[in-house]
């Protein structure tokens, strides 16, 4: 008998509809994850060396290191995107099977590749295109409902 | 540039360790409660995140020597380990579509990285 009644877990019944909801949420995670990678890449490009070996004890440098990261807007934004992506993943995992939801994260590769071409000006080649098509097709097969036989 | 066996083994280990991160997150997610207390006492979630960070640190250490085109795709083997734990721990069915889908994703990641050479 605890003074504060703890609420029951909000159970999510396994159903095709809920699995689909989870799938869509994980796709959202991959978009956030790709944004995080791009922002962190941009942030680290302007980031100097974090640890000054001449300044002695690393523990005494922790506030300065923390400030260097937090004041770097792209880097901070990237880490925040990772945080949001993780929270969304946890919410998504309630709605379906781990073995279906988890591999969908591979779509992150697709968004990162698209952003690398459109934002960073990298070039595509036949390997990259075939790889991306295979990943998208694999995720589609995974999310497809099983034929009963 | 040759990829040392130690780097390959370390990335394999990182993918194996990391797959337990997803297991803890799923177990935590299934026990999620709609209260601040429920979320704060859900120890499985921070354990899952901590395992991810350990896995990431191992991967970072591993890729210091060796070819990224070989090492990076190996991280995706985590999907395969996760498939095994999903069956053993959460009793999820192993279906043909899951094997085919994960197989295509793994192949896609390998081919994609060949393009980065």
Image: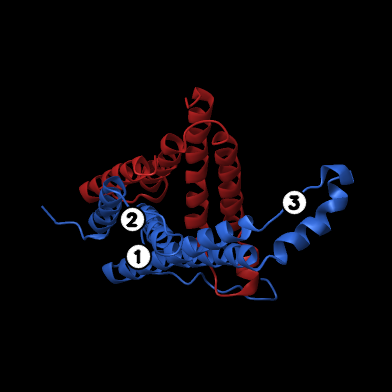
Q: How many marks?
A: 3
Q: Are marks 1 and 2 on the same chain?
A: yes
Mark 3 or 1, nearer chain start: 1
Q: Badge 3, how many Cα within 10 Å: few under 14, some, many 20+?
A: few
Instruction: Determine crowd level at label 1: few under 14, some 14-19, many 20+ residues with C-alpha closer than 10 A.
Output: many
Q: Residue A100, labelled with which disc? A: 2
Q: CA distance from mark 1 to mark 2?
A: 8 Å
Q: Colour of chain A?
A: blue
* Residue at mark 1: chain: A
Task: Say whether residue B57 is left or right of residue B103.
Answer: right
**Secondary element at tag 2:** helix
Mark 3 on the same chain as mark 1? yes
| Residue in the foreground of this view, choosing between A39 and A98 | A39
Question: Is A62 on the left-hand or right-hand side of A143?
Answer: right
Would you name the residue on which mark 1 appears?
Answer: A23
Instruction: In the picture, one chain is red; tell me its letter.
Output: B
- Residue occupying the point 58% across, 54% down: B49
Badge 2 crowding class, 10 Å Cα cut-off, few under 14, some 14 to 19, many 20 or more, is many
**Which label was assigned to residue A50?**
3
Instruction: Specify which label sits upstream in the sequence, 1 or 2.
Output: 1
The image shows residue B111 at horizontal and vertical percentages of: 31, 42
Measuring 33% from the left and 55% from the top, which residue is drawn there?
A100
Please determine whether, in this image, residue A53 is positioned above or below residue A109.
Answer: above
Identify the subunit bearing mark 3: A
Closer to us: A70 or A114: A114
A52 left or right of A87 in image: right
């Amino acid at each position: 008998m605890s003074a504060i009644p703890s609420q029951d877990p909000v159970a999510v019944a396994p159903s095709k509809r809920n699995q689909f909801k989870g799938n869509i949420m994980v796709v959202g995670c991959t978009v956030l994850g790709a944004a995080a990678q791009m922002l962190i890449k941009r942030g680290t490009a302007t980031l100097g060396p974090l640890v000054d070996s001449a300044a002695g004890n690393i523990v005494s440098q922790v506030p300065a290191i923390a400030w260097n990261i937090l004041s770097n807007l792209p880097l901070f934004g990237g880490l925040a995107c990772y945080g949001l992506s993780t929270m969304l993943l946890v919410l998504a995992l309630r709605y379906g099977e781990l073995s279906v939801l988890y591999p969908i994260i591979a779509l992150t590769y697709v968004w990162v590749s698209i952003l690398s071409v459109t934002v960073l000006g990298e070039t595509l080649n036949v390997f990259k295109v075939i790889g991306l098509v295979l990943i998208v097709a694999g995720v589609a097969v995974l999310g497809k409902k099983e034929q009963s036989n | 540039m040759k990829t040392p066996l130690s780097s390959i083994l370390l990335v394999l280990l990182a993918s194996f360790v990391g797959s337990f991160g997803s297991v803890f997150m799923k177990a935590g997610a299934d026990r999620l409660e709609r209260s601040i207390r429920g979320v704060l006492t859900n120890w499985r979630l921070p354990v899952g995140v901590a395992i991810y960070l350990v896995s990431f640190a191992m991967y970072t250490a591993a890729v210091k020597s060796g070819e990224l085109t070989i090492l990076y795709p190996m991280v995706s083997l985590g999907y395969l380990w996760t498939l095994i734990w999903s069956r053993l721990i959460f009793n999820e069915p192993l279906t043909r579509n899951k094997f085919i889908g994960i197989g295509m994703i793994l192949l896609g990641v390998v081919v994609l990285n060949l393009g980065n050479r």
